[in-house]
Image: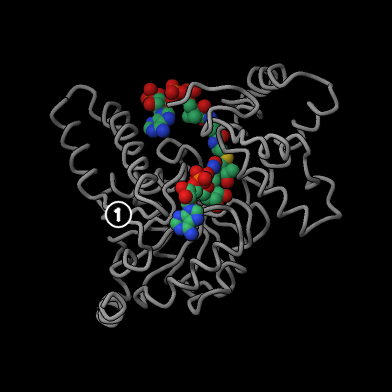
């Protein structure tokens, strides 16, 4: 029944929507990044479905989006409470929740994946979605570090595949890296560039190179900070203070690692260490591995390099 519906909508969509703008967005993964991406699309007037493995996670994402939208509304309409309320209600009304990715993508123009940073898991997801999503649907991964080309291998739509790399916190960070693989069509590229602007981001383009632009510079910097700590050269607190006051960064490297998530950071460096064992910048970092083993994943679990009050 579900597959029949998906096949019908695929046929209808492929004939009608080749050049239409992106109106229906599905975000897979309702964690830190997925909830932020869903939020900026919903507040920009698009219909958004947010998908995660269980109901509790998508409900948590919905609450996080509501809280964040209140901050945005307050800023946008500080002298007009009625307008702020309307912005919040309208944005939330465009947001749908799902635990069934195959069903959710049936009417999608764009699917943005923001699930765990593991190649096989991302490939399995896209392989399944490729068989049920409409032909015109563009697939995008928000991966921090994995090759977009290798994720796209799982599909028959490499011409409609891109990397869309957002930054945390998505509602605040203004950048969107758009990564095109050699097969990405001009039409797909132009549409996602327009879409990025429509959700309020400044876009930059990058080849499918490890870490794209920002993470190729930022991740080795964060890992080098942990190595500095491991050598006993300075405390985490002093390294953070030094980089904030001496280099003007809004957060120190340990605050940022906790903010990004130590699990995600570990997956990034582990993947690069395996792929590029000769590069000293990508060497595994024992302290990171130990904290992740202890379940200390940073702000999201209440402890990483620092302790946080649980929300
Ligand atoms: C690894 C990955 O692949 C790539 C990455 O994402 S790497 C990480 C990139 N991100 C960064 O480097 C973040 C660095 N940190 C920062 O820029 C800042 O510390 C921060 C924006 C997170 C918080 O800023 P800070 O001034 O300390 O806190 P705060 O006053 O609460 O927030 C600043 C503004 O952002 C808004 N804000 C913060 N978080 C928000 C959220 N989740 N939703 C909506 N608004 C938010 C606040 O309302 C506030 O707005 P105002 O200035 O108009 O009052
Ligand atoms: N944390 C960051 O600062 C940051 C920034 C940019 C990009 N990214 C990338 O975004 C992606 C997500 O990172 P995050 O920080 O939001 O992680 P997160 O752990 O906060 O959320 C990941 C979510 O994906 C869900 N999930 C896992 N497998 C799934 C599946 N098969 N189907 C549906 N949902 C599934 C999990 O339940 C979880 O809620 C990763 O690829 C990461 O590298 C992270």
- In the rendered view, would you say 230 is above or below 44? above
* Residue 180, image quadrant: bottom right
Q: Position of residue 78 (x, y in %)?
A: 24, 23
Q: Which quadrant: the C terminus? A: top left
At horizontal 58% and vertical 32% (from top left) the residue drawn is: 298
Q: Residue 291 vs residue 298: left or right?
A: right
Mark 1 nearby-residue class (10 Å; few <14, some 14–19, many ≥20): many
* Residue 287, image quadrant: top right
Q: Position of residue 200 (x, y in %)?
A: 37, 45
- In the rendered view, would you say 252 is above or below 88? above
Q: Residue 293 vs residue 152: left or right?
A: right
Q: Position of residue 265 (x, y in %)?
A: 64, 43
Number of dots carrying numbers: 1
State the residue position of label 1. Answer: 48
- In the rendered view, would you say 188 is above or below 192? below
* The residue at label 1 has a CB less than 8 Å from ligand 2: no
At horizontal 37% and vertical 55% (from top left) the residue drawn is: 51
- In the rendered view, would you say 277 is above or below 247? below
Q: Position of residue 62 (x, y in %)?
A: 32, 42
Q: Residue 53 vs residue 134: left or right?
A: right
Q: Which quadrant: the N terminus? A: bottom left
Instruction: Give whichever of 238, 246 is nearer the camera.
Output: 238
Q: Residue 197 vs residue 294: left or right?
A: left
Instruction: Tell me if I can see residue 113 in this picture.
Output: no
Q: How is the image coloured?
A: one colour
What element does badge 1 sit on?
strand
At horizontal 32% and vertical 43% (from top left) the residue drawn is: 59
């Amino acid at each position: 029944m579900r597959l029949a519906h998906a096949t019908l909508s695929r046929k209808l969509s492929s004939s009608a929507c080749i050049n239409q703008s992106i109106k229906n967005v599905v975000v897979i993964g309702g964690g830190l990044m997925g909830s932020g991406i869903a939020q900026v699309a919903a507040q920009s007037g698009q219909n958004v479905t947010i998908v995660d493995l269980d109901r509790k996670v998508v409900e948590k994402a919905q609450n996080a989006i509501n809280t964040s939208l209140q901050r945005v509304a307050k800023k946008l309409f500080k002298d007009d409470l009625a307008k702020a309320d309307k912005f919040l209600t309208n944005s939330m009304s465009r947001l749908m929740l799902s635990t069934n990715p195959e069903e959710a993508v049936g009417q999608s123009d764009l699917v943005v994946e923001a699930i765990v940073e593991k190649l096989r898991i991302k490939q399995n997801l896209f392989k399944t979605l490729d068989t049920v999503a409409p032909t015109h649907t563009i697939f995008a991964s928000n991966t921090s570090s994995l090759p977009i080309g290798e994720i796209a291998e799982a599909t028959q739509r490499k011409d409609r595949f891109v990397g869309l790399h957002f930054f945390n916190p998505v509602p605040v960070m203004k950048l969107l890296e758009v990564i095109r693989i050699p097969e990405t069509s001009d039409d797909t590229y132009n549409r996602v560039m327009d879409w990025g602007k429509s959700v309020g981001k400044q876009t930059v383009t990058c080849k499918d190179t490890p870490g794209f632009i920002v993470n190729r510079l930022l991740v080795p910097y964060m890992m080098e900070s942990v190595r500095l700590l491991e050598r006993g050269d300075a405390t985490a607190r002093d390294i953070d203070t030094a980089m904030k006051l001496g280099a003007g960064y809004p957060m120190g490297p340990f605050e940022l690692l906790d903010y990004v998530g130590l699990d995600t950071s570990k997956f990034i460096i582990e993947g690069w260490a395996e792929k590029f064992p000769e590069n000293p910048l990508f060497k595994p970092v024992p302290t990171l591995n130990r904290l992740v083993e202890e379940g200390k994943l940073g702000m999201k679990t209440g402890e990483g390099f620092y302790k946080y009050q649980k929300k």
